Image (cartoon, rainbow, N blue to C red):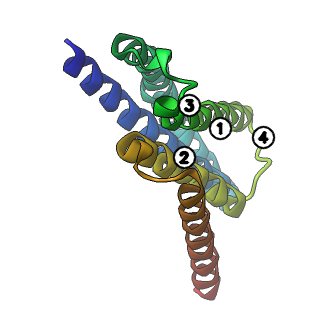
Amino acid sequence: MYPYLIALHIIFIVTWFSGMFYIVRLFIYNTEAGEKNDIEKQVLRKQFSIMLKRLWYGITWPSAILTLIFGPLLMFLHGWNNVLFEEAGRWLLIKLIFVFFLYLYFLSLHKIFKQQMNGIFKYTSQQLRIWNELATIFLVAIVMLAVVKNSISVVWGLIGLALFVIVLMSAIKIYKQLRNKK
């Protein structure tokens, strides 16, 4: 039974992250639709509204909830809750801290979703592109912790994560420069 629960947990993590990655792309496209003429803007925003609602309520929210159900269930079934504050469970504690912040990020996406559904576009497409990469940072940190567990020190893990963030932000900056040249 346990392997099936792990598989379900991983499946819902994947669909949740897919939804978070794609929803921000739709936020970006919806924001950029505001630069079009009135007819194009109206048509695009109507279509994006449909796509946003279906993705958010049909895939992303259910996946977030099921991830939140299966994660703690697996933790308790495997007994990790008993060693969470001990040396052997330190990796899991750090991972759960990242997961907590990931859920805060997810709720921030919900806020942007609600704003866009109400015709409020507070963020530029560039700001949304940067915000989109935060999910990538969480993904890398959480997967690395889940896979390597205690094989890597906290210091080296943080250094690696910082370097990854620097590379990611540099790539965003380069992309913006290339895009502005066109």
x, y (%) of residue 121? 76, 46
Which one is in front in this view, the residue at disc 1 or the one at disc 2? 2
Tags 1 and 2 touching, CB below 8 Å: yes
Task: Decide: few, some or many residues near mark 3? Use Cα within 10 Å; few <14, some 14-19, many ≥20.
Answer: some
Q: Earlier in the sequence, mark 1 or mark 4?
A: 1
Which one is in front in this view, the residue at disc 3 or the one at disc 4? 3
Given residues 100 and 151, the one toward you in this image is: 151
Q: Quadrant of residue 67?
A: top left
Please give the residue where the numbered disc 4 appears in the rendered image.
Answer: 120
The amino acid marked with disc number 1 is: Tyr
Residue 93 numbered mark, or none: 3
Task: Decide: few, some or many residues near mark 2? Use Cα within 10 Å; few <14, some 14-19, many ≥20.
Answer: some
x, y (%) of residue 35? 69, 62
Q: Earlier in the sequence, mark 2 or mark 3?
A: 3
Tags 3 and 4 touching, CB below 8 Å: no
> At x 42% / y 28%, what residue is drawn?
59
The amino acid marked with disc number 2 is: Phe
Please give the residue where the numbered disc 2 appears in the rendered image.
Answer: 138
Please determine whether, in this image, residue 58 is positioned above or below residue 135.
above
Q: CA distance from mark 3 to mark 4?
A: 37 Å
The mark tally for this picture is: 4
Please determine whether, in this image, residue 141 is positioned above or below residue 59.
below
